[in-house]
Image (cartoon, grey):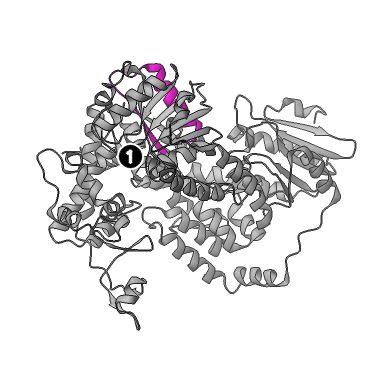
Amino acid sequence: MSANMQQDWKHWRLRREDSGLAWLDLDKADSSTNVLSPELMEEFARVLDALDAAPPKALVIASAKPAGFIAGADIEEFARLDSVLAARVLVERGWMLYNRLAAVPYPTLALIRGHCLGGGLELALACRYRIVVDEPGTKLALPEVMLGIVPGWGGMLRLPELIGPAAALDLMLAGKSVDAKKAKRLGLADDCVPARVMESAARIVALGGKPARKLPVQERATRWAMNGPLRKMVADKARAQAARKVSRANYPAPFAIVDIWEKYGGNALDVPASDPSSLDTIFTSPTARNLVRVFHLQERLKAFGKDSDFAPRHVHVVGAGVMGGDIAAVCALRGMTVTLQDQSVERIAPAIARAAKLFERRHKGDAKQVRFTLDRLIPDPKGEGAARADLIIEAIFENLDAKRSLFADLEARAKPDAVLATNTSSLRLEDIATALKDPARLVGIHFFNPVPMLPLVEVVQGEATDAEVLRRATGFVRRIDKLPLPVKSAPGFLVNAVLGPYMLEALRCVEEGIAPETVDAALVEFGMPMGPVELVDTVGLDIAVAAGKALAGEGAEPPKRLLKLVGEGKLGRKSGEGYYRWVDGKAVKGAGKDEAGGGLLGALRGRRKPEAPPPIPAGLAGRVIDPLLAATQRCVDQGVVADADLADAGVIFGTGFAPHTGGPLNYCNSLGKTPIG
């Protein structure tokens, strides 16, 4: 073996210190991020060969890239798999290689700065120690379930051993990430340190042979029970947790993770092909293919705005209602100075209070960061910030005359190069722009409620919208870490245009005597995050009626029960009653029988014992979904969105349309049907 063997490596660099410590830096060639490609993994095996030949006193594995530690396996490789055999080879390669790393005789340490995801975290778990750098960008996760697959390179074995089965299953079933501090609290990391001392800390731990963390007696007893006599109980509880969110038919991966941990010690290769949790089943499921498709759709949306260097320092938002206030809060979270305008300080105060709660959650109780962020969110009842803003967003009520008047005033006061944007959800930009001397300045930036939670933002191009204005608006959306979807100005744009017919058909079913609970159950079973009737209640029945033709369609009337409920002041969640009664922000479903001591008081407290729901009529979900499919196709045909893939992306990320289908039009193609409506 050549002494300079490491010089032949394309992706890895080995450095040795006189102390005997070796540093192995990962720097994937021709890539801004470290992704575990087949070539890189094959090279890692040769690195281990070199280390076997000349073992170091200890080894630290780190990233040479500022973008993070390791972003995970190569999604493109997974997408190219053409057989179950190829999938098993992929899993076996990582499983064997990481087992080999775990078995080396010298101490190993993963120094984690930035994202450490999927196969990257599985590599870190195969090391003896882990140190995380205390920075906002440090995130650790096993997100394979989000792609419809399982962590097959040792994650299902080592994570439960390290932090306990309950915490490990919770992370793996949701695919959620933890930051550096939480990683330390969970025991996932041995230490959490500032960047300035990370190398010194790694050197001390790796060479010092830090003793294994000793758990309290009670925790050791709990871990022993969970991995022994209570193993099935833990697994059953985890399955129940998964079943409350998804069905095994639509999403087999979370259930497979539990099965593989419980029955096969976390080794996916040991699962027989006939088992529903086998690699054969997982890798051949339509869900896995479709979730990979969704991943690529998301990456396509993220690419919009990359050509824009527009980074507004000052954003002015007009309208401090729920939508406008939350838009302002999200901008402040992203480091922008935000002035929030409404008719009085009293109208602005609730938005500031709501923003403070959001900042506390996002900053995890860090009072200093909360204060800094709040300082960037400035009440501005007189609208003085409009003259200094780089971007102005209008988020007032949906009244054409009011918006025209406002934009005429804003144009007169705004900087010549400031972007003027409307958050309208139903009005045409062309109609609003008639109030402007220069209509080319107006663009639509349409958020969805709740703004902090929903990722999609429609960037709306009117007939006169200047291309540079559109580019800036798209760049702004990416600056606040949202997914921009370019759409043309048309009634309802994309998302509302497809939701209207969908909700209308659901309400028609209710008019015919089908219980709202049954309609909603059918669509939740299909894979929607919320039933359409509950969605109408959540949006507000008055808003549904006000949407008029957007909801009812040309020549149709809103359902009579909808009009009756609105006439009685029953507007849904915000009034406490609509198609459902609402208690503590949740819909009370099912007639049910009172439990002892129940009665009306028990019902108000949610203490009714629901009876078994009636069976869902065959074809009900399809009937309600069909108008949505047809509306999506119309939006493509009419050029509201550029192509079918963007339509699928918009409906998935804007409405939550069942991701396991790959989107409405992909779903149609899988059934061999053409949307008709």
The answer to which quarter of the image holds residue 500 is: top left
Number of disc labels: 1
Say which quadrant the C terminus sits in: top left
Residue at 34% from the left image edge and 17% from the top image edge: 440
- Disc 1 target residue: 651
- Which amino acid, mark 1? Val
Q: Quadrant of the N terminus?
A: top right
Q: Which residue is found at the position 36% from the left and 19% from the top?
A: 441
* Magenta-colored span: 456-482
**Residue 242 drawn above or below residue 378:** below
Q: At which x and y percent is residue 490?
A: 24, 29
Q: Is residue 2 left or right of residue 250?
A: right
User: In terms of depth relative to the viewer, which is nearer, 591 or 327?
Assistant: 327
Q: Position of residue 228 (x, y in %)?
A: 61, 71
Q: Residue at x 77, y 41 (%)?
A: 198
The location of residue 446, given as percent across then percent down, is: 36, 34
Say if 510 sits above or below 143 in the image: below
Is residue 129 one of those drawn in magenta?
A: no
